[in-house]
Image (spheres, rainbow, N blue to C red):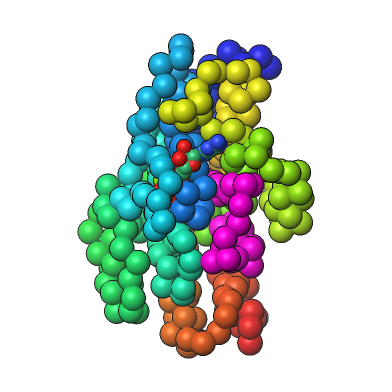
Amino acid sequence: MDIRQLRDKILSFSLEDVDLGSQGYTRVLLQLFGYTGHGKSSFINSCMYVLEEGENFKEHAEAGETDHGLTMVRNAYPITDMITMVDNRGCSKMNDFERAEVYAQLGNFVPIGERVEWKDNYKAMMEALEISELEPNFSDFIVPIFVYRVRKQTSTESMQDVKTFMENCPKMTGIVPIVVLTFKTSADYLEIEKQFRLMGAETVIAIENYTKMSNIKTLGRTTDILMVIDSALRNVRFRLELPRNPKRERIERKKFMYNYIDQMKSHPERERMRVQPFYKRRERSVCGIY
Ligand SMILES: Nc1nc2c(ncn2[C@@H]2O[C@H](COP(=O)(O)OP(=O)(O)OP(=O)(O)O)[C@@H](O)[C@H]2O)c(=O)[nH]1
Ligand SMILES: [Mg+2]
């Protein structure tokens, strides 16, 4: 498929075109996660740029290097009528509450357009979950995308946290996160790709983001970025081949959150958390560290 066909396929994607129809979903939400400064906002700009004709690069999502993270508000960027990208707040180091907040964003329990504050107590966490019932969203089909830069790793970033996130995402969304390795030409991305594959990543795509400083469209860069969106849509089509119930799936995501927070309370000093899928809980403990 040439690049024009690939772009047209993405632009014309409709949830109604799947065999069983949209089943109550109205849009695909490509949810970006990753540590601060790894290129999430730049990836949104890159996606919008490659879907447009011409070479008029615009910075829709503000991007830049900061110490504590630039993106604080969970903003949404529609890239087609059916597909919206969400720039979730990045983490620098993760404590239990930050981890829980990441899952709250993933589960769509944090309103779009709202500043994401890392909560520091269980009560606030539970209250935020309850408030999400005011406008419950169950019609977004969530696809997790993990953005990771190959160039440097800081001491606060933990591959164990990344691995746990990779494992928990399919329990919440049915999809293994698509891994986007940014700064492709700055280091040995094949080595990092291997690490992610060993963690169970199914799709790993290394890219060089288009930025304010570097935005001459090339075939390779553009193709890599389009491939990420295409992979996400292939996951959506695959999941929608089976009957789905969006409301029930939201309830399952919420149960995951309750379970996660409950485990945090029961094991405040434990290092890592592994939450079992809901259907396995009767036979096994909910927390892998028992
Ligand atoms: N060379 C190069 N620079 C990149 C790439 N991706 C991002 N950058 C630069 O890296 C810096 C951080 O990128 P952002 O997109 O702001 O990162 P972020 O993940 O959104 O960061 P937070 O909002 O702080 O969580 C910016 O100066 C970008 O221009 C890339 O693939 N290659
Ligand atoms: Mg950002």
Residue 280 falls left or right of residue 189 = left
Instruction: Tell whether position 167 is magenta.
Output: yes
Going by the image, does 28 lie left or right of 290?
left
Q: Which residues are magenta?
A: 142-170
Is 110 one of the magenta-colored residues?
no
Residue 171 is situated, as x and y percent measured from the top left of the image, at: 57, 61
| Figure check: 229 above or below 65 | above
Question: For residue 262, which quarter of the picture?
Answer: bottom left
Where, quadrant-wise, is the N terminus in this rendering?
Answer: top right
Where on the picture, by quarter, is residue 170?
bottom right
| Residue 242 rendering spot, x and y as whole percentages | 59, 44
Q: Nearer the viewer, residue 174 or 189?
A: 189
Residue sitting nearer the eye, 155 or 158: 155
Give the left or right position of residue 188, taking residue 268 as reference.
Answer: right
Residue for point 41% across, 56% down:
67
The answer to which image quadrant residue 165 occupies is bottom right
Residue 23 in view of the camera: no
Q: Is residue 204 above or below residue 248?
A: above
Question: Which x, y percent locates residue 104?
Answer: 40, 62
Q: Residue at horizontal 43%, vertical 85%?
A: 265
User: In the image, what residue occupies the spot 58% across and 76% down?
Assistant: 272
Q: Is any part of residue 116 visible from this angle? A: yes
Q: How many marks?
A: 0
Q: Nearer the viewer, residue 279 or 31?
A: 31
